[in-house]
Each structure stands twice: as C-alpha cells, then as structure tokens.
Image (tube, helix red, strand yellow):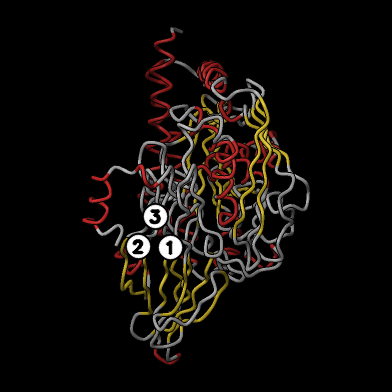
C-alpha cells in the first residue's frame, strides 16, 4: 500500500473519530458534555493501542483513555469479547481518574474477526454519594463505583446495571441517557470505519496502524531533539484543601524520551483533591506535546515517549480507596509545573503560569417549601480563569488551559436547572503585568431561581497562591469567593447560600511575562480602552 494511500486513510480515520465525538456531543444529556465538550473519543487496534483521537475533547480524558482500553481487554478477557458487546467503567484507576467519568469501549468485528475498538469518555452530572465535590474522605463516599463490566453483551443491554445506576444517582435520566450516548457514539465510529474499509478494500487496521505508529514515533523523536538532554526541575505551590501544597517535578530528557518524577510533591490529602498517577501522566504528556510538538497527533506512539514515576503516598499518585472526586483541581497544574521546568531551555515557547484548574461548581437546588412539589435538581457549570502570557502574545482571557473545555454559557446553565446567572464578565486588572499581559479571569454571580434554595460545591484554587509571572512579569490576581454582602465563602467544599443572597466568584488571572516597562504603549492604551485595566 502506498504512503499516499496510507496518509489519506489516516486523515479519514481522524475524521471518523471526530464524527464519533460530535455524535456524543449531539446526543449527550449532561451540559458538561453538550456545552463544555468534557469528553474524548478514539479508535484503537486489537492490542488496545490508540491509533487516532478526536480533536474534540480534553487531554485528561484522551491521554488517560489511551491507557484504559488495555485494562478493558485484560479485565473482560479476550475469550469473552463478542460482536455486539459494549463495556463500561468509571474506575478512577483503570479509567480517567474519578467516578464522574464513564468510559465505554466497544469492540469492532469484520467478517467475524476482531479488528479493533472504539472508546469514549464523558463526565456525567452525578454518580450519587456526596455529590460532585472534594468533601469525601474515601472513594466509597464519592458515589457509585462501576468496575469494568459489560454494558451490553451481543447487543443486549445489561438492564441490571442500569437499574443499579438509576437507584444510586440523583439525576437518573441524565446519567442513563449519557451511558446510551457513549455507546451510541462508538457505534457511529464503527459504522464509518466499515464504510472506509469497504471503500479501500481492506479487512483490518493492522497495516494502517503500523504506518501511523511508525511515522508518529519518528516525528516525535525528531521533535524531542529540540529539548537538550539533561535534567530540569520545578516546584509550584497551590492551595490544596485549605492547606497549601507543593508540586515538584524532575524531568529527565534523554533524546527519544522524557521522564517525569514527582518526588518531593506533598502527600495525599484527607479530602478528594488527590490525583491518580494516570491523570498526572496525561497532563505531563500534554505539556511536552504542546511545547515540543504542538501539531503532533496524539496516539500510542507519541504518548509512549513520555513516562512518569511518583512515590506512593504523594498527592499525584493517589491509591484506592483515597478520595479523588476533584482530581482535576490539582491535576491541571501538572502541565504548568512541567512547562515551568523546561522554561529556561525553551524561553521562546513556554508561557507564564495561568489559572490552571477549572473553576467548576455543582449546585444542589432544593425547593424552599418542600410541599411545593418543585423537583430537586443538580446543576454543573464549568468556568475558566486567564491563561499565562505567552512569549510573544498576551495570555488568553477566561480560557481553559490545559483542559481545553469550553466555558459553559449562562443561558445553558439557566436552562439546565433553577439557577440564575446575574453576572458573567471579564475581571479587570486580573492579568499579571508584563511585556505580555496575563489573560483575565471572570466575575460570575449566581443565585437560586424563585422557589429554590441552593448549596454550592466549590472546587476552586489559586485563591491563596496566584499564577506566577515569568522573566520579570507580575503574578496574576488571586481568585476570590464571597457572598454579595462580602461574607467570605470557602473555596472548597459544599456550603449553603443563605436565602436572599447570591454567590460571587472572582476567577484568577494569568501571570505576566517579561518586564512591564517593555510593553508596547499601543497595547497599554488598548488595555485601558477595552477596560482590561483601570
């Protein structure tokens, strides 16, 4: 088969998994998937190695899911994999890091022979337990744990599993609907794959996968040569759960491989901000790819160049049954942590630190008058602070980096439940000063709709420890959380919003880069005219 033919098929495969992901977006019940794009999708060979991933999705899902399919094959057992099957789990250590992410894997058969797998992941609004938040002290409290098992066997859905799910979650319709959406989007991918194989008159993915892996491995090695061999270190302090913690990394670059060791990182926490190592690995790999090979496709061969280690008991290597519900809060900082380590070697590439962790919150809405008949609702909203300034450009305001998920529109949040978004605007003066300015955070004010009281599960960081500037740039503004009468509100944990009050979130800004005195005067004037600074 010619190289050109292989390349055409590779591009087709990427379009197939992108259609797979968009099918999930269009059919998902949860706003986190439908509006924010908190998902991933990909196609794998018979060994469970990822051949291609969708552009739509997040590194934390894609890069963890890249390792997850092999777990499915091992746990189900090759002798129990049948045509028409669909497998599911939300195991944080064999999936994508916490119970709120369900991963579904479907085998693909052609002419009776197994030729590969499609897999996808999405965040669901509720899995029972304490609800989405950091308050639990064991994973058992965080919700329903579904080990790797069959969602369907030979086309017959496991109704016993669905019955268990329905009786253990608060938003049963959304969660069960999302499980069907996950399996359905894999089916979309399989149909498109068969059409491609028919068109090119081939029966399996082996030759194409070998071509993809070979070309990717060669290109990855070439790009890694841009990072001089050696050892690079960095330490970052973040808020943790009410007590600041240190994240530490030592990167060892050896030409064709980069290894991250997280020794020196603070120990695990009593609450659910701990991170399974597979999730930390995902955001380390992402950091290296965006710095060294931003146009490189993410697949088994590109990810194989990046390895990790961490002492047991550190917050980036949580073990069962430690709580991990909001592992993203700490896990998202791994990218800036690792980029900071190589900043001296790549000063024209690495940005200043940004807000990092998403400012997600989950609202539990309950009727003010229990006799009113108003149903209880759970509402999840994703929001982002500012990114760090880049070597030649300002940071990006209200944008999720490194997760890449979209900030959910106020209208979508209000449509999904009894929540009113009173304000959602850029936060002036929140970006750190520098030759390039840090991205701005947001100010968001929320309250209950008429007839409801709300409690908000907070999972916010960079309140005590703002994003650091780089090379003379100023730090970004720290975040803030308070009621509209300035009563303090904890940045982590579930708390009631008193009747008649609203909750105000002041999201952190990104750090600046370079000496502020070197900033272009036209850029300074534009900042003032736009209201970015006062």
Q: Is residue 532 above or below residue 284?
A: below
Q: Position of residue 186 (x, y in %)?
A: 47, 40
Q: Quarter of the image containing the C terminus?
A: bottom left
Closer mark to the observer between disc 1 and disc 3: 3
Determine whether 493 is above or below 398 in the image: below
Q: Which mark is residue 431?
A: 3
Which residue is the site of mark 2? 427
Label 2, label 3: how far apart the Cα atoms are: 9 Å
Residue ranking furthest to the right: 312
The front one of 62 and 317 is: 317
Is residue 100 shown left or right of residue 173?
A: right
Identify the residue under disc 1. Answer: 507
Q: Is residue 246 visible?
A: yes
Disc 3 is placed on an element classified as loop
Q: Are marks 2 and 1 in contact (CB under 8 Å)?
A: yes
Element type at marker 1?
loop
């Amino acid at each position: 088969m010619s190289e050109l033919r292989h390349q055409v098929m590779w591009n087709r495969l990427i379009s197939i998994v992108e259609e797979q992901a968009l099918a999930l977006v269009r059919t998902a019940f949860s706003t986190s998937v439908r509006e924010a794009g908190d998902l991933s999708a990909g196609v794998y060979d018979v060994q469970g190695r990822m051949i291609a991933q969708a552009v739509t999705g997040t590194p934390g899902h894609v890069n963890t899911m890249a390792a997850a399919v092999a777990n499915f094959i091992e746990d189900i057992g090759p002798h129990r994999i049948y045509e028409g099957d669909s497998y599911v789990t939300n195991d944080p250590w064999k999936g994508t890091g916490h119970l709120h992410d369900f991963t579904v894997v479907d085998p693909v058969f052609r002419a009776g022979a197994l030729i590969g797998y499609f897999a996808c992941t999405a965040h669901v609004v509720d899995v029972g337990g304490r609800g989405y938040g950091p308050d639990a002290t064991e994973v058992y409290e965080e919700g329903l744990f579904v080990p790797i098992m069959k969602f369907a066997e030979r086309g017959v859905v496991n109704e016993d599993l669905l019955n268990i799910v329905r009786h253990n979650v608060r938003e049963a319709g959304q969660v069960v609907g999302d499980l069907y959406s996950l399996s359905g989007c894999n089916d979309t991918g399989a149909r498109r794959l068969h059409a491609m194989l028919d068109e090119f008159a081939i029966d399996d993915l082996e030759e194409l996968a070998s071509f993809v892996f070979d070309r990717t491995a060669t290109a990855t090695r070439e790009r890694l040569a841009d990072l001089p061999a050696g050892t690079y270190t960095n330490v970052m302090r973040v808020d943790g759960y009410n007590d600041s913690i240190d994240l530490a990394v030592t990167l060892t670059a050896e030409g064709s491989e980069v290894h991250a060791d997280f020794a020196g990182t603070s120990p695990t926490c009593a609450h659910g901000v701990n991170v399974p190592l597979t999730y930390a690995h995902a955001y380390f790999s992402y950091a290296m790819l965006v710095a060294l090979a931003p146009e490189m496709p993410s697949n088994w061969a590109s990810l194989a160049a990046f390895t990790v280690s961490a002492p047991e008991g550190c917050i980036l290597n949580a073990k069962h049954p430690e709580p991990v519900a909001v592992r993203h809060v700490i896990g998202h900082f791994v990218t800036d942590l690792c980029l900071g380590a190589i900043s001296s070697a790549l000063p024209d590439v690495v940005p200043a630190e940004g807000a990092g962790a998403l400012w997600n919150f989950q609202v539990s809405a309950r009727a003010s008058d229990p006799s009113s008949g108003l149903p209880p609702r759970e509402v999840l909203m994703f929001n982002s602070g500012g990114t760090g300034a880049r070597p030649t450009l300002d940071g990006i305001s209200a944008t999720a980096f490194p997760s890449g998920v979209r900030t959910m529109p106020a209208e979508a949040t209000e449509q999904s439940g009894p929540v009113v978004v009173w304000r959602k605007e850029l936060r002036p003066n929140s970006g750190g000063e520098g030759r390039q300015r840090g991205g701005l955070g947001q100010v968001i004010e929320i309250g209950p709709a008429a007839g409801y009281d709300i409690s908000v599960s907070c999972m916010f960081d960079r309140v005590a420890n703002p994003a650091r500037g780089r090379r003379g740039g100023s730090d970004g503004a720290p975040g803030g959380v308070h009621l509209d009468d300035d009563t303090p509100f904890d940045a982590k944990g579930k708390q009631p919003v008193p009747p008649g009050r609203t909750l105000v979130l002041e999201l952190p800004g990104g750090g600046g880069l370079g000496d502020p005195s070197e900033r272009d005067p036209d850029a300074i004037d534009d900042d003032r005219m736009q209201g970015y600074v006062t």
